[in-house]
Amino acid sequence: MSGSMVEVVAYIMRYWFVFAMFVILVAVIYASVSEYRQRKYVMEEVGQYVGYLEIESGPEAFIGERMGIREENTVGRLARSDICIEDYSVAKTHALLYKKGEELFLSPMGRAVTMVNGKKIAQPQILRTGDVITLGEIDVRVFIKRTRLQNDY
Amino acid sequence: MIIKRKSTSLILWFMILFGISGLMLLAFIKGEFDPGALKLCIGIVALILIQYNVLKGVFKHLERFTLLIADFLCVLSLIVLYRLDPDIAARQFVWIVIGNAAMVAALLVIRKIYNFGRANWLFMAIMVALLGSTLLFARAIGGAKNWIDIGSFSFQPSELAKILFIVVTAYFLSTRKKMRSLWIYVIFTAASVGLLVLSKDLGTALLFCGTFLVVFYAGTGNAWLTLGGIGVFGAGAVGSYYLFSHVKVRVDVWRDPWSLYNDQGYQIVQGLMAIASGGLLGSGLGLGMPGVIPAAHTDYIFAVVSEEFGLIAGIMLIVFYLVFIIRGILIALRARSAFDALLVFGCTVMLSLQSFIIIGGVIKLIPLTGITLPFLSYGGSSVLSAFLQLGIIEGVAIKNGESDEAEIAEMGGEFV
């Protein structure tokens, strides 16, 4: 290639260099912002739960379903309950599930039958990971998160 | 609850195309084909593809965007250096390879370690020894006395001191809660900055001061002491203006470089004229005259980029550094321990201040103090320290990702 020809090519390629840099910049910003938003959303969602309940036995359709536990929850059949189990053996407002200090408590409401590990309870009861709660004809297992406690802050 | 990450292959491919097109253009620019450019091109493309894919494969939670930005800056650096001097570009490539190895080492160490505990006293001793040795044995290049020769090999001890300074800072500010137990650290910082000023390495002294003030405020949240520190720093700056002639010269040149054109102002004026002659879109790669700027391949590389790729490219370069800084700060905010957070924050502040000080100096926003532009300037120690800081950032990012994944997995979520 002759010298002047290369100079023309170099002059035209200015546009390509600026364009390529711009594409890289925009792609980096776009990808990192959208990833940051998604991660923030998920981490906030995860952060507000203390643990979760998993349905172990009951109607076939419910088994394996997971419901997140927040700081204070009502458990019952009503759709406005924090933890809603739509089964006729569960009372409208069946129990309260709340965190006090570092412990998670279960307190029965009204005359509904609530059992923890097969024993009927009348007073608020401390729950541990692995406990089975029986609400009417449904058994749920409790899982409490550990990871939050290990962090410095 | 599933975190799904974006694909970054578009960024990677554009980066590789940018590198290939730039180096191939330079291969033909002198009339006949130059095989050196082709070798360099194959080398850098292979390096980036291997480095990025291997790291991404081994570490699931690698912070990919900072790594990609650093890679892009390395590609740009090789193009500009090859245009200035092919030999320098080849040496820079070797340093980038060594830098990558250092980055992986730093990443592995930071991932496993909690904080360095008693070893920090050793780091402090090494740092004072390094800076003291520059004062005694160093050779002056361009006014600053900060080079040490060992045989044919020369290096800048202040670059290694930067990393140690960040580690020591993070250790003291994260473990000592009382102000009274911090005095030894403050004296140590003042001593290091004093040694740097005495060896006329003003840019690095400014860098250490700035990093200390910002990280001190972030670590302790004590506004009054920080303001006091800024006051002392200002008094020191004004005092050194009257005490040391080389500081006075720098400030006078900054205020009016044109009147000293034939003397100390030559570099600044040439840099400004280079940026101006490039215009918005630049003169075209290989068509400008960056050779007339003194230190075009180290301190003044920003002026060369602005001249040949255009002012738009210069501004985008600044935005690249900004994105890098923001990603670094986000990692620091998400870190699980105070030491990790301060470590990443220190690295980020150091890199951002470094790029700000030298870009500001080149465009005559602040007095010029010669330091290198991270990842872009030629210089073995500079590339090595920038990659070590990147490795520290990546190591903490991987730690964060692993904790996040554990938290999500416990709630039945997934991290893809």
Image (cartoon, coloured by chain):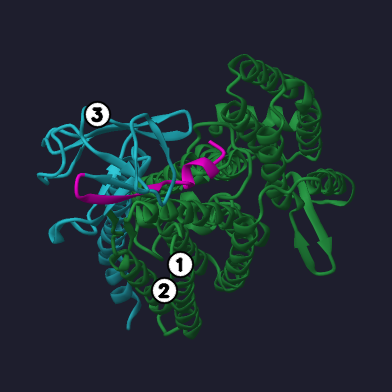
Name the amino acid, label 2. Leu
Q: Quadrant of the N terminus of chain A?
A: bottom left
Q: Earlier in the sequence, mark 1 or mark 2?
A: 2
Name the amino acid, label 3. Met
Is residue B303 or residue B198 the one in the foreground? B198
The span shown in magenta is A136-153
Name the amino acid, label 1. Ile
- Rendered hue of chain B is green
Q: Is residue B275 above or below residue B376?
A: above
- Does label 1 lie on the same chain as label 3? no
The residue that mark 2 highlights is: B23
Q: Looking at the rendered structure, which numbered label has been put on residue A109? A: 3
Residue B146, how many percent across, how many down?
Answer: 77, 49
Q: Is residue A145 magenta?
A: yes
Is residue B147 or residue B363 the one in the foreground? B147
The residue that mark 1 highlights is: B79
